[in-house]
Image (cartoon, rainbow, N blue to C red):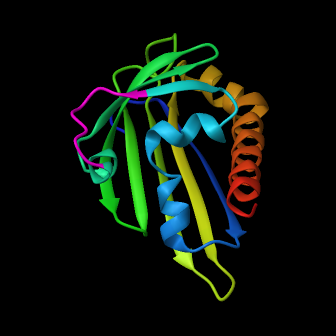
Amino acid sequence: MIVEGGDILGSVEKSIEIKASPEKVWEMLALDRFPEYVEDIKSVEYTSEVNTPKDKYRVRATVHVIEKHEEFDMEITESIENEKITCRSKGPFSQSGNVTLIISLALKPTKTGTEITYAGEYEMPYGIFGKLLDKLFMQRVSEKQTEKSLEKLKSILEK
């Protein structure tokens, strides 16, 4: 996947197996459930109309996300029930105003539950400095946050 207009594209991909059905994991992938297991997210509020629970997963559904240090909007760009959901930030993701974020969560049934794979891509501003910043800092931070979120999701679903 290529993000248009960005200088540097960084990515993180992590998987974990959860002893829960894909249907049960899917329920936790509604964007307004993210604050339950993604540490930096304070709140997620739907900005598109939500009349039924399925509306939370539909393509073009939009949300406003408030994190510790950022606020941004996201839109669902792909949604296959119990299999995959992909979201893209709408407008700037960071205070620098130049970062785009794309996240995808894919579910695969296993013998004992579900393997969930998080794939995130982001573009870094600032040319070569952005690339250095990504390698020295952002990549490691993103990987640790992703691992932590997946572990927390696993602990919630395996209770």
Query: Is residue 125 shown above or below 138?
Result: above
Q: Position of residue 15 (x, y in %)?
A: 67, 63
Q: From the viewer's perspective, tell me whether residue 35 is left or right of residue 101.
A: right
Q: Is residue 133 left or right of residue 105?
A: right
**Residue extent of the magenta highlight:** 45-52
Q: Residue at x 40, y 26 (%)?
A: 45
Tag count in the figure?
Answer: 0
From the top left corner, tell me how far across and down residue 113 is, in percent.
Answer: 64, 78
- Looking at the image, which is closer to me, 127 or 52? 52
Relative to residue 97, is residue 155 depicted above or below?
below
Q: Quadrant of the C terminus?
A: bottom right
Residue 2 appears in the picture as rendered: no
Foreground residue, 84 or 88?
84
Residue at the (70%, 45%) spot, across then down: 149
Membership of 49 in magenta stretch:
yes
Residue at (78%, 42%) from the top-left corner? 144
Q: Main secondary structure of the magenta part?
A: loop
Q: Nearer the viewer, residue 83 or 53?
A: 53
Seen from this angle, which residue lies furthest bottom? 111
- Any part of residue 115 in sight: yes
* Residue 99 covered by magenta stretch: no
Kindly indicate the quadrant of the structure image that contains residue 56. top left
Expressed as whole percent of the image width and height from the top left, the position of residue 150 reads 70, 52
